Image (cartoon, grey):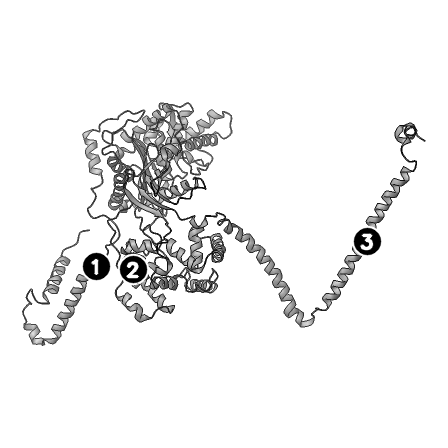
Amino acid sequence: MNAFEASLKGSRWSRNTPSNWKSRIRNFFLDLDARIDSSLFSSAKGIRELYERYSTFMDRFYVGRWKRWVFIEPLSEAATLGLGGMVLMLILAIPAFRETADEDWLKKSDLAVTFLDRYGNPIGSRGIKHNDSIPLEDFPDVLIKATLATEDRRFYEHFGIDIAGTARALVTNAQAGGVRQGGSSITQQLAKNLFLSNERTIERKINEAFLAVWLEWRLTKNEILKLYLDRAYMGGGTFGVDGAAHFYFNKSARDVTLAEAAMLAGLFKAPTKYAPHINLPAARARANVVLDNLVDAGFMTEGQVFGARRNPAFAVDRRDEASPNYYLDYAFDEMRKLVDTFPKSYTERVFVVRLAIDTNVQKAAEDAIENQLRQFGRDYHATQAATVVSDLDGGVRAMVGGRDYGASQFNRATDAYRQPGSSFKPYVYTTALLNGFTPNSIVVDGPVCIGNWCPQNYGHSYSGAVTLTQAITRSINVVPVKLSIAIGQKEQPKAPNPAKIGRAKIVEVARRFGLKAPLPDTPSLPIGSDEVTVLEHAVAYATFPNRGKSVTPHSVLEVRTGAGDLVWRWDRDGPKPKQAIPPNIAADMAGMMSHVVSEGTARRAALDGIPTAGKTGTTNAYRDAWFVGYTGNFTCAVWYGNDDYSPTNRMTGGSLPAQTWHDIMVAAHQGVEVREIPGIGMGQKLPPERVANAQANAAPKVLETKPGPPPVLTKRGADILVRVEKLLDDAAKTATKSTANDSQQAKPASSNSALAFPQNYAAEENANASTPRKN
């Protein structure tokens, strides 16, 4: 007995514990172990017996020899592949079904907006207003048949995806070596319109297919067709066949004829390309294809469509209805984002929105760009331009996203990222002033290299010691690069790569101004090699006349419901200006940039009696030409170039961009109280010779006949041509009845005869043909 047992023996606990406690504990664990072993053995035995019974049972179904390889193995492989396919389909379907998570998915795109200008005048509308005023059964039968024959002949037979139609389209496109026939069903197109974008990617097509099946499960065929007819984009800023019928034919969709229904059905494929108010011949050719489809599908006979072929539809002439479409597209995108910020409990989908647009400035901007491109575009090999005019609070007064909205809806003012060239340098000089430099600081304009990259000046020469004001006035490239190095050295004197640190500081300052473009770090960033948009660039410059406060670009000033209730207002609910740089730095920069206009590269932009500052920009190979400038009232950015990035013919920012900026700002300041720019004051009157030169270089007055789509033949003109044709036919019949001798001796018909008009008409044409036509 050891000391521990002795102590237990003498303790109270030992006196109350049985003497055989050890054997009892040992027996308990032995019993537990035996029970576990017995349970495992019994379970294994039961499983084994169950498996043997299962095997015995399944042996009854055993198939061997040829039957096994003909039936069993293929079915087994099919089941395996089917299970794997179902798992794969589930994985692919998850992104598509996320689009339907919103319980209000049917109204997701159902946003109708009427736009007013800043003075309350209606200027256009955007969005889709669900129109239940025309039930499906009230649409003309010819319109329904034309749509089904052209877009989806098996609409009432498939489950959302037309397998046969898709296969047929793939074969046709493969044989043609390009896209000749679409394979999307009406349900798939509706799914794209409701949930997806227009990007051409495999991911979108997969999502489209799953959503089409989902729509077929949730809605009836007639409901799907009604939604498609109401929500499809039909060109001209209209959605749905009823809106298109009113826009193109001035009538309800209930009243369209077969020829008009064929023209409307032809718009589903490419509404911009076949819009009759833009290209009537193409629209009529497409309508003929629709009539062919009606016959091929067996919906109508050739005799029934013959009248529509002989008498094609006429579109309403809307050439004089100028609409700021690029601006309205931008405003509608902004409105959609704004609505997403409203509480989810807010269900209103119809709004009246007052915009910051000034229609006079908008028209001046459109005319200035058109006049410059018409006069000098061919000489400079420039085909496109974009501009944005902004108030100093960021409200966009005018926006031109391209030369012709009908030819291209791509908004180059908001969506095109182009290199700003030297117009990016003010952000570099601002960073330098923030880091101890002054406008009179001296920097040596001489060779410098960062790695293997050595920047060159425009004239491939150097100016030696120059001030920062002189450097920005002459648009010297070397100085901003040297400033980026010096800024980095001031930040971290012993850093191995000070230029990289300096560029990071420049990007930080540009972000404060409001630039949201990527701005990747490259050695050439200080001279404008990174890309920005015209909109962001224009509004960022407002920081200078705003005493250093940056603002947010916006088009919406006020949002009201259709009933007139105020929902949102910019001055109350919009983001407030932020102090990006100190006021004294903004004033110093304004003083430096004013020299660019008064004596530097942008002298064509100078305004008589209005203080002006800005910066030109020209990129490598003359691909982009910019002028971005401001007064005490507005900022404006102008860009010229080509969509395919082809070089211009040595166009610089001081040429067409500066002249266009001048023409726009002259119009923008009409009737406006001119304000001073901090750091410049009220400016000064230009010398008489400068005013004369500016007037000589100014764009010509707007022509009475505006550029636009080719004229549309009116009903009256068509009647005249029909009468002329009838007169000619009558003249031919008269000539055949007379003898040859009588014809030779006959005198000219009198002015009252049937031949008088054709003869006089021909003589006039010959007389006109003898005179060279001036273009």
Task: Name the mark on residue 715.
Answer: 1
Q: Quadrant of residue 569?
A: top left
Q: Are marks 3 and 1 in contact (CB under 8 Å)?
A: no
Of the two numbered discs 3 and 2 in the rendering, the one whose residue sits closer to the viewer: 2
**Which residue is painted at 69% across and 70% down in the image?**
63
Compared to residue 189, the image places residue 522 above or below, namely above
Q: Which residue is mark 2?
A: 255
Task: Name the mark on residue 157.
Answer: none
Q: Quadrant of residue 634?
A: top left
Q: Which residue is mark 3?
A: 41
| CA gap, disc 3 and disc 2 | 86 Å
Compared to residue 263, the image places residue 612 above or below, namely above
Of the two numbered discs 3 and 1 in the rendering, the one whose residue sits closer to the viewer: 3
Which residue type carries mark 2? Asp
Which residue type carries mark 1? Lys
Residue 138 drawn at (x, y percent): 34, 60
Mark found first going from the N terminus, 3 or 2:
3
